[in-house]
Amino acid sequence: MKTCLAWDGGGGYCLQPFRGIEVVELNPSETARLPWHARLLLAAVGGGLVALLVTAALLVPSTRGYGTHRQLGLPPCSFQVLFGMRCPSCGMTTSWAYLVRGHVVQSLEANSGGALLAIAALVLGPWSLVSGVRGRWLWRPLDERLAIVIVVTILVVTLVDWGVRLTM
């Protein structure tokens, strides 16, 4: 049986694709309505990430490269108080505050892992929020392997960045 969408010239329609036109089959998981609990989770995660980005935009980045979180009424880093050195997450809030202002170099200098995490939040926050509200995936679902690669990359970069800061 032919598989096209055109008049076959012989008295009927066939199902053979037009030349030069690709027939795209939609994946049902991309068009199906998401269950309520998935919608709720996506909207909550997306809303949380967007709220963190808005909070970062309201903070003034510390010129020291860390300590911006103090503007939120939080205490100094316990690791730094106890051991006299910055912890792996020191500078993440500062990094986010720089990144939302478009200062990528300063963001990377404050905490490279934090900069990558903020970039991920800039993409995944709105995507999750809109997908949850719509009840359908915006574009397509996030591939699990890609999510693992993103998380592992951010962790490795954060730890390498910390190691470099300890040796300086």
Image: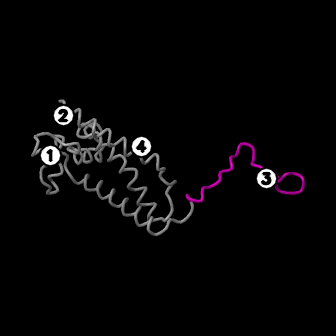
Q: Which residue is mark 4?
A: 149
**Does 146 sit left or right of 25 as displayed?**
left
Q: Which residue is mark 1?
A: 79
Residue shown at 75%/47% (left/top)? 18
Q: Which residue is mark 3?
A: 6
Q: Residues within 10 Å of mark 3 (few under 14, many from 20)?
A: few
Above or below for 77 versus 109: below
Residues in magenta, as a range: 1-30
Secondary structure of the magenta portion, mostly? loop
What whole-number distance in Å separates the C-alpha atoms at marks 3 and 2?
A: 67 Å
Residue shown at 31%/38% (left/top)? 157
Q: Residues within 10 Å of mark 2 (few under 14, many from 20)?
A: few
**Does 38 sit left or right of 167 as displayed?**
right
N-term-proximal mark, 4 vs 3: 3
Q: Do the numbered discs 4 and 1 sit on residues whose CB atoms are within 8 Å?
A: no
Secondary structure of the residue carrying numbered label 3: loop
What's the residue type where badge 3 is placed? Ala
